[in-house]
Structure formats: C-alpha cells, structure tokens
Image (spheres, coloured by chain):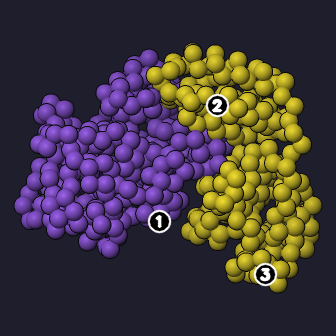
Chain colours: A yellow, B purple
Amino acid sequence: MSRVYKIASESSVIVYFGSTIDPAISQEVQKSYLALKAEKCESFFEIIPSYASLMVSYDVMQFDFDGVCEKLETIIHHAEEITMNEPKIITIPTYYGVEVGLDLELLAKEKNLTVEEIIALHVKGMYSVYAIGFAPGFAYLGEIDERLATSRLASPRKAVPKGSVSIADRQTAVYPNQSPGGWKVLGRTPTAMFDASYDGLSLLHVGDQVRFESISKAEFLKLGGKL
Amino acid sequence: MKGFLVENGGVQSCIQDAGRRGFSDIGLTQSGAMDEMAFGYANFLVGNDFNTPSIEIALGGIALKAQSEMCIAICGATMHPKLNGHTIGLWQVHQLKKGDTLSFGFASEGQFAYLAVAGGFQTPHLYGSFSTSIKEGLGGIEGRKLKTGDQLPTSGARCPMDRRKLEKQFIPHYPEEITLRLVKGYQEAMFDASSQGTFFNSVYTFKGEGDRMGYRLSGEKVVPSATGILSEPICYGAVQIPSHGEPIVLLKERQTIGGYPKIGSVIAVDCFKLAQLKAGGRVRFKEVSLEEARATTLAFYRFFGQKGV
C-alpha cells in the first residue's frame, strides 16, 4: 500500500496509510508503529498511531524533513514483513444497569430496540483497539454493530463518570477517569483503564482485542465498582 | 526541611519542566512549561540545566516562605514580586534567607512567570517528567495546582554567580499584538485559496478562552471544505479549525488525538509568545517555510544547550 508523508510541524511528520477505518489499514499502522518502537531511535520523541495515520515527533538537531521521511520509510517498508503475534484479548466486565447506563433508554427509543437488545448487540462484538488518545488510557474500539451506530449527545456532559462504557458513531470506549464527554453511556466497568501498576500504564494497547461481558450489579460492586 | 512553604497558591501555580516525552501513544499529554523561553532563562540564571523543574505561576497571586537559604530567579510575566515586602527585579538572581517571604501581585505584562531555584525542586518525578498536567490530574504535587500548606523541597544548591542578571537585549517583552509564524501542512488542502486568504489576512483576538490545552482565537471565520476527518495525532502548535470556523492553537496540554481539520502548525518559539498573550491581545498569522521554521527552533534549543525539541 502507498504511504503519504506530510509535514505536521517543524518537528513532526504524519504518515497517512489511508483515510478510512479499515482493519487492513489499521494493521499496517500497527506494524509500522511496532517497528518504529523497536528501533528505539532516541531522536523519535513521540510515535503516535491512530486509525489510518501515525505521527512521529523528531529531534530537529538530528533530522530535517526529508531525512526523517527517508529513515521512517526504511523502517516502515520492512515493517510489512512483520508477522504480528496473536492479538491479546481483554475482557472488560460491565454493569449495564440503567442507573449507570445513562443513555440506554434514550438509545433504545432512538433505535427502536429494547434495552436488552442493545446490551446483547454491544456484548456480542469483538473490538480492535484502533487508537489511544483523548485522555490517558482512552482506547478507541471498533466497530460496533451498525444497528447501534449513533451520534454524540447534542450537548456533551460536563462530567462523564469514571469507567463509563460508551458509544459514538461506530466506536466504543471506556472513560478512564471522570471527564467531560459526549459519547452515549451504556454501562460502567469497575476495571481501571489507566493505572501506574499496569505494564505500560494503560490496560489496552493499539492492536489488542476487546470484548465486554455483562455482569450483575452485585458483581460490579464486589469488583470495586462505584455507582 | 529545605525549600518553600506555600502560603498562597495564587491563581494557578504548578511545578513544570520542559514536559513529558514518549507517552503520547497511550494518551498522556506532553505538558511542560507554557513559555519555555522564560522557563529556560530562569533556570539558566541560577545555573540549572534547561530541563529543571521550576514553579510556573499563571496570572500571579502566589506567596511563598523560604524555609532555608536559597538562590532563585524569576522570569517571564511582570507580576511585581516582593521579597519581605520590597519590590525585586525579574530576570536576575536573588539570595533568600530562612524566613524570607516572597509574594506576587498580578501580571501586568504577560501571563506566565517562572520561579527557578538553584538545584531545582525535589518534587516527584512521574512518567519521565516533573510536570503537572492539570487536565489529567497527574504529576507535580498530586496532579494539581499549588495550594496553601504545600511543601516544595529544594536541594540547597548555590548559584554559580550570585548576582547574575540577564542582559537587557535578551529580555523578552509581551506585546498586545503578535505575529505567529506557521508552517502549512497537514490538511492544508482542505482550506481553499479564499479561506487561506481570510486566515492569513485577518487579525484575531484572544478573548481569554484558553488554558494549558490551547487558546481559541476570535475573528473572521475560516471554513474548511470538510467538517470532520478521521481522528489522527495532533502535534504541538497545530491550528485546528472546528465547525465554528475560529482557529484554536493547541498547546502543551493538548489532547493527543483529534478529528478537526488543521491548516498548519505554529512554530514552537511563537507558541511560547502566544502563551504569554493577555486576554484582549491580537494575533496575526504568517506563513514561513519549513526550513526557516526548523532553523528558528534549532537556534532556540541550541542557545539553551538542549538537544533538540
């Protein structure tokens, strides 16, 4: 596949692998990301993957734009040969009660489905971690069933509770901490998404696979969940 | 204990170094001093390495009590600092004795001042940096701004030159109108000639809508040819234009990934200038070549003996 290198700033370059959410493109981004990380080049200050692009912030003392593109292309070209390990599968226990699933009833009305059907559709999916951003440990997971695809709230919440399992467009995510946000909330998990005790600090990493498991209120509370 | 006791945290004061590196891929913001130039001079004056934690004081109002002898310098916004009630100068080294009090008024020029102490502050080092990320509640002192009763330990190091002063010609000023040099790139193609004309020929106003994440500017609206793009990584200085049509310049605590079109990126040293712009200040944008942008950034970090950016 062809790659396009573009100037992002005087010290960063963005590489486009495509322009859509597509597992094949995402896989190419992930391989390139892994290859660049493995290089341990001290002049690459940040390597940030997203859906179809990857940004590298580099040391301007070491590289100019052409130089960094050449170096990146050499590494990324060989990344195509990488065989990726089987993805890690992570299960996120989720309590889907309406007291924490703040938008369940709204969504049921919007989609002409029952709350149970919505939960069933969300639990059924196996999702890929496409990108991590917005907040530490906030993973963009895709893609949710077309029947659940939904817009963001017209007026975002000032404070979405920590652990909120939510959806927007065809993506799903967990809010690692209380923060403002406009994604529709289906439930809440007691699992921490970002924690100093985790290897790599974030529970999820780009390339992982995620599934949600419905748990009862009692289990949620037992696992340390807070209403 | 050696160090400062915070008697009043002021509007928003926090510990900052040059920022956090290498964690953007899991969503941690860069953070770091909003104005690395004033930050750099403060550390330079007391003999510290460039990337040494200092106190970033936003708008003013902080009051501190020295619990030991110390050697400090204050650089950046004019906040009329007083030592035991007597006005002292910025951009120079001061010797403090145990029991001395340091108080600050409110900024009359600029927004951010930096208080560096010889040897730096001995505060927690988290994820490769001393910086506080206010947005994330992480780093510095419990991830928050300083408050009454906080202890800020220091090493008690001496300054290499007790009376060092920055020469006048190096002292930056923070005017009410600034020009930001910008490198085009990114989704430049999403802005047609007329949009770009509007953008580069307008004077924008900073109405104070901004924080460590970024500054929103008000003025002529610029319309990108598409409203949303696939979420992608965001770099320092990126100028994004959401559907309201007014530019937002993304700064130290920007989110790592976003989905708005960007016309280009403001070069680092001009982001530092922007950080110091007071509410009501005016901004113009000027396109520069990538070569010129790189040379400017290179010169800045070389001056402070820092490797790269």
Residue at x 51% of width, y 60% of height: B138
Q: Check the image and name the residue furthest to the bottom.
A: A218
> Circles 1 and 3: CB distance less than 8 Å?
no
Q: Residues within 10 Å of mark 2 (few under 14, many from 20)?
A: few
What amino acid does circle 2 point to? Lys
Q: CA distance from mark 1 to mark 3?
A: 28 Å
Q: Residue B263: image x %, image y %?
A: 52, 33
Q: CA distance from mark 1 to mark 2?
A: 31 Å
Which of disc 3 and disc 2 is earlier in sequence?
A: 2
Q: Residue B225: image x %, image y %?
A: 61, 35
Q: Which chain is home to disc 1?
A: B
Tag 1 secondary structure: loop
Q: Which mark is residue A40?
A: 2
Q: Residue B247: image x %, image y %?
A: 46, 42
Please give the residue where the numbered disc 3 appears in the rendered image: A222
> Circles 1 and 2: CB distance less than 8 Å?
no
Residue at x 60% of width, y 68% of height: A178
